[in-house]
Image: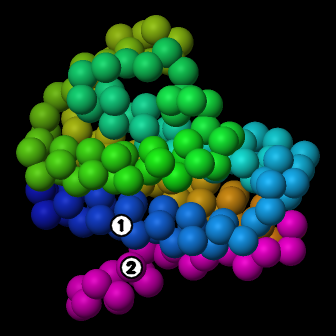
Amino acid sequence: MDAADLAGLARYLEWADRRVWAALAGVPADAWQRPLASSHGSLGATVEHLAGTEWTWLRRVEGESPPAIVPPGGARDRAALEALWPAVWAGWAAAAAALPPEARIAYRTTGGAPCVTAFGDILLHVSHHSAAYRGQVAALQRQLGFQPAATDLIAHLRESGRP
């Protein structure tokens, strides 16, 4: 993995998240918090985890170690989530432009354990984790009767003109 690959992952992260957010626009508040059988119990809580994880890992890359994977404001509040995501996307793009894949990032887990991980591995993890949770969001949207966004990497590559 090289710097161009990392920049591409950061672009994909933003592209896919923006598509998810656009598909969530028509989901009413009662459906957002409706209890569902899922990892986080509702569509809103799952989206919060998705955004919170991207935010938490970015904070770690920037030298902080948040004690929990909850974005500022406890973003089950849709307006808080909507306000948070653009800064997270910009942060990942800036980090991908500034840090080489092998840059060692020291941080603490939410349990307090010290860790050191290469930046490229962190961004790859965030990309995979986010893809998994976007899949959960899509399944929950279907359960609620809403059409989810298509967020496959190959669709992003095709749209971006990459052969």
Which mark, by number, is residue 156?
A: 2
Disc 1 from disc 2: Cα separation: 7 Å
Which mark, by number, is residue 42?
A: none
Considering only vertical position in the picture, is 50 above or below 137? Answer: above
Considering only vertical position in the picture, is 19 above or below 127? Answer: below
| Residue toward you, 48 or 154 | 48
Q: Is residue 17 left or right of residue 133?
A: left
Where, by quadrant of the figure, is residue 9 drawn? bottom left
* Amino acid type shown at disc 2: His
Query: Mark 2 packing: few (<14 Cα in 10 Å), some, or many (20+)?
Result: some
Helix, strand or loop at label 2? It is helix
Name which residue lies at 73% across and 79% down: 147
* Amino acid type shown at disc 1: Tyr
Where, by quadrant of the figure, is residue 8 drawn? bottom left
Q: Earlier in the sequence, mark 1 or mark 2?
A: 1
Q: Residue 50's spot in the image, x, y percent?
A: 56, 47
The magenta-colored residue range is: 144-163
Q: Residue 96's spot in the image, x, y percent?
A: 18, 50
Which mark, by number, is residue 12?
A: 1
Q: Main secondary structure of the magenta part?
A: loop
Q: Is residue 22 visible?
A: yes
Labels 1 & 2 near each other (Cβ < 8 A): yes
The mark total stands at 2
Q: Is residue 107 left or right of residue 134?
A: left
Q: Residue 150's spot in the image, x, y percent?
A: 57, 78
The quadrant of the rendering that contains the N terminus is bottom left
Name which residue lies at 51% across and 29% down: 72
